[in-house]
Image: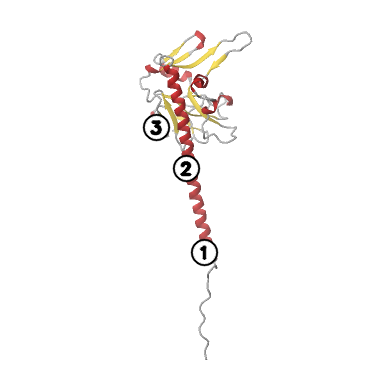
Amino acid sequence: MMDAPQPPASRCGAWTATELLVVIALLAILAILLTGTVHKARQNALQAKCVARLRQIAVATLLAANENQQKLLLYRLVPATPGQGAQETTWTTTLKPYGIQWEDTLCPALPPGGRSTYIAYGRRAVDDIAKNLKDNGYQGSALGGSTWLLMLRIESPSSYVLYGDSVYSPQIASVRAGQQAYSFRLNATKDNPGIHTRHNGRANLVFVDGSLESCPPARLKELGITSGYNARTELTLW
């Protein structure tokens, strides 16, 4: 009597080398996709926090101007007195009475513990404003060394850049790290800080009327900003 045929051995739990390679490749692809998605989501969250901080700065600026007949104090040098040296008033100290603290001048995208690059918000440099506006919207005074921005005399307040994502880097020898890039010029050079496109290739800007905009390089160029710094703090032309 012939033996009954036996069923084929079960392959449950057995993997061939080809199957293992396919699974490993799929897992690697998923890991890459997830890493990119998480990175993009994190960048979007940082940009949202950045916009929120810049909105606080914009509101504080409008409040400060409203209390001074629509004039914004750009700079004031208080002469030295006996026992006390000369003191400079920057935009951050001007806005401090309106709720802006030192930490509010730092962008949330600042790398933790970063020392070689200081990512902060800058206000348009006083000499850049003076050169651009000449006698229309800019007022200098020998009294106390004060300079003002006459906000009501700006012809296009919704497109006149006042604050933005700026940067200090080792390439900019003339800016001290302690200043947190408090100022920038529309057209950056190797010796001057400029706009920094750190948010997925965009820069957040605040205009004289208090509006905000996230600008790609093409938009920056439209606004007259033809050079700045990329995410790696390298000087570049758009």
Disc marking residue 173: none
Residue at far right of view = 83
Disc marking residue 19: 1
Q: Amino acid at mark 3?
A: Arg
Q: Amino acid at mark 1?
A: Glu
Please tell me which residue is depicted at 51% across the width and 78% down the height of the picture: 7
Residue 63 in sight from this viewpoint: yes
Quarter-of-image position of residue 207:
top left
Decide if residue 167 is on the left or right side of residue 154: right
Is label 1 or label 2 in front? 2
Query: For numbered disc 3, what is the local secondary structure?
Result: helix
Which residue does the numbered mark 3 point to in the structure image? 219
Which tag, 3 or 1, sits closer to the chain's start? 1
Provide residue 87's location: percent of width, then percent of height: 57, 14
Question: Could you tell me if the residues under marks 2 and 3 are in contact, i.e. CB atoms within 8 Å?
Answer: no
Counting other residues with Cα less than 10 Å from the Cα at mark 1, is it few (<14), some (14-19), or many (20 or more)? few
- 141 is higher (above) or lower (below) than 188: above
Which tag, 2 or 3, sits closer to the chain's start? 2
Of residues 25 and 69, the one drawn nearer to the viewer in this rendering = 69
Provide residue 60's location: percent of width, then percent of height: 46, 23
Which residue does the numbered mark 2 point to in the structure image? 41
Provide residue 99's location: percent of width, then percent of height: 50, 24
Which tag, 1 or 2, sits closer to the chain's start? 1
Please tell me which residue is depicted at 58% across the width and 13% down the height of the picture: 86
- 78 is higher (above) or lower (below) than 55: above
Query: For numbered disc 1, what is the local secondary structure?
Result: helix
Is label 3 or label 1 in front? 1
Please tell me which residue is depicted at 53% across the width and 58% down the height of the picture: 24
Q: Amino acid at mark 2?
A: Ala
